[in-house]
Image: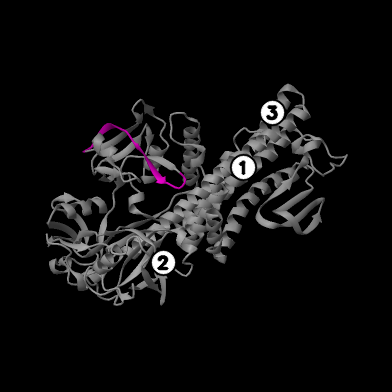
Amino acid sequence: MELLQSLYSRLLSLDLISIFWVIIFLGGSIFVHELGHFIAAKRRKLFVPRFSIGFGPKLFAKNIKGTEFCVALLPLGGYVAIPQLMGIKELEGQYEIPENTPPISCADTIAVAAMGVVFNIIFAFILGTILWCTGMEQPQSSMNNIIGYVSAEITLPGGEKIPGPAKEAGLRVGDQIIAIDGCATRDLADITHAIALGKNRDQGGPLSTITVLRDGQQQNFTVRPVLFEQNPHAKESFRVIGIETFQELFVAKIYKNTPAQRAGLEEGDKIISVNGEKLFSYSQFNDALEREENLQLTVERGEKMVNISVRRERLFRTRPRLKMATTYGNCEVLPDFFDKNVMRDPYTDSCTLQLLSLAPGFREPFPEWAIGDRITRIQGQPTRNISESFSAFQGAIGSSPAVTVRSREFFLPVEKIELIPAESRHSIGIELCGSYVLVRKNPIQWIKETAQIIFLTLGSLISPSSDIHLKNLSGPPAILDALHTFAARDLRLLLWFVMVLNVNLAVINLLPLPVLDSGVIVRALLEKIFRRKIAAKMLMHTQLAFMMLILGVVIYISFFDISKILGRRDAERDYFRQRRLAIDEQSLWNGLGEATSQ
């Protein structure tokens, strides 16, 4: 039921423009592939009884020069019927090949089968050319191979902290990663793929040899990646080593009445170093902020270098919250103030309680409740602040205290309650941002890099020493989800993904499986070499067996695709939950001030 609800909500979230682009580009990719087969078959004077745009029942059709061109109900792609390619009547379907049609030759078969792949590459080339002209904006951090941060430890999804593999191996901030396991690395994507798709392993687990350029000298480091579960819902884990790449940092915003404003920082300043240490990443800046009370910043302002001293302050980062265990599952509430302009002390100042999270079990007894609703009274008394509310609920453990939500009184069976204190952090009152670069790659480079990643993935998939499995691949649900996401964000991202998709279609059809284009070519070559047709019964059974195998693989991958989508939905829900829990830093400087002393 949860799965159906998730897919239904996902469907409702689709806008018409995104649906249009999904149909155009996904359908277009399949259509282009089939168009290649069609043009080659026609030029070879083969019998082509139908060319269909879409699948399913025909909406309308017209016969032109012996071929029925039709538009079907489902617009995602299409197909071309070429019964001569199948070679046996059992697989030729309902079409009767005219008697005067010449037999198909080996050259005909190869040309027709190969042209689908060729057209996918041509389509990818056209899309790559468009991206070459328009360019794609990418974060600077994704376009270099310089280490900007090395994590001292990695926190696993269960909360366990382990030492960072890169830190243990001796990698440092400023190192330039030029190769991993002998494969050259140019940017973050190369590094991420080389680590995640690595095939080296010994008795101690996964292994990577990383070559870096440090002080002009090449050095090799042996790193032991850890498996990090990036999507707990799908149980999907990848190798990571705990690094970030270099990112220049600029002051995007300065809040009023803050140490940064008093010290003389200005918006647009580029931070070069902190306490004499060259700055390579946002995480490195945060570490310095937590470690040092006084920061000596060197900033680039126009053509000048300016030294600025600033003293940090400690602020609330989140509001405190109450976590209650009830008969219907857990729910969380947090203090909510009617005056949003000035933050108040959540422990003592008057407030209502806002519903932060609700377990699914609340839907049946309290269908009116929704995230964001306010609890205005407890046992008939107005909610004064988080401390008094905690005491009121604590005194009612084991009973069903009355709570007022939306002006109605409900009885909530409380079994346990916990006060989770507000979190705090150090701040100087600024927002930082990174820089973006306009990436222009020629289409051949796009296609080459994409093909390299595909072959690297296939190699890892069949290697017993890698950590890549079938469930890590993407099937139709993940492709549709990605198409919709990119269509809603940026048309250039959509063009890039469709280009990648077409290269994938081309490479997959190069695999020598009987039901794919390369399988048809291999069959034609074998028949040419041995000068005899493959037995019809054997061909039919082989085709059906591999068709069922591929269908089973697609269903298997799609099952995990749906789990990944559900996992991303949970991650999005947790992200917005954290947004509701977070305190706006500007309101802190205007009202609440310091959380604790230095």
Distance of mark 2 from mark 3, alpha carbons? 64 Å
Q: Is residue 228 magenta?
A: yes
Q: Secondary structure at mark 2?
A: loop
Figure check: 293 above or below 507? below
Query: In the rendered structure, which amino acid carries the disc numbered 1?
Result: Val
Q: Taking the image as drawn, is residue 492 in sight?
A: yes
Q: Which numbered tag is attached to residue 487?
A: none
- Which quadrant does the C terminus fall into? bottom left
Query: In the rendered structure, which amino acid carries the disc numbered 3?
Result: Leu
Report the residue marked by disc 3.
Answer: 525
Distance of mark 1 from mark 2, alpha carbons? 50 Å
Q: Is residue 87 magenta?
A: no
Report the residue marked by disc 2.
Answer: 371
Distance of mark 1 from mark 3, alpha carbons? 18 Å
Image coords of residue 235 (percent x, y): 45, 43
Along the line of sight, the residue nearer the viewer: 519 or 110: 519
Quadrant in which residue 508 is drawn: top right
- Which quadrant does the N terminus fall into? bottom right
State the residue lying farthest toward the right.
99
Left or right: where 88 falls relative to 308 = right
Q: Which numbered tag is attached to residue 117?
A: 1
Q: Secondary structure at mark 1?
A: helix
- Is there a contact, CB below 8 Å, between mark 1 and mark 2? no
Q: Which residues are magenta?
A: 215-234
Going from N to C along the chain, the mark reached first, 1 or 2, is 1
Figure check: 549 above or below 413? above
Identify the residue shown where x is 40% and y is 71%.
Answer: 373
Other residues around mark 2 within 10 Å, as few (<14) / some (14–19) / many (≥20): few
Identify the residue shown where x is 43% and y is 55%.
Answer: 570
Quadrant in which residue 207 is drawn: top left
Other residues around mark 1 within 10 Å, as few (<14) / some (14–19) / many (≥20): many
State the residue lying farthest toward the top.
530
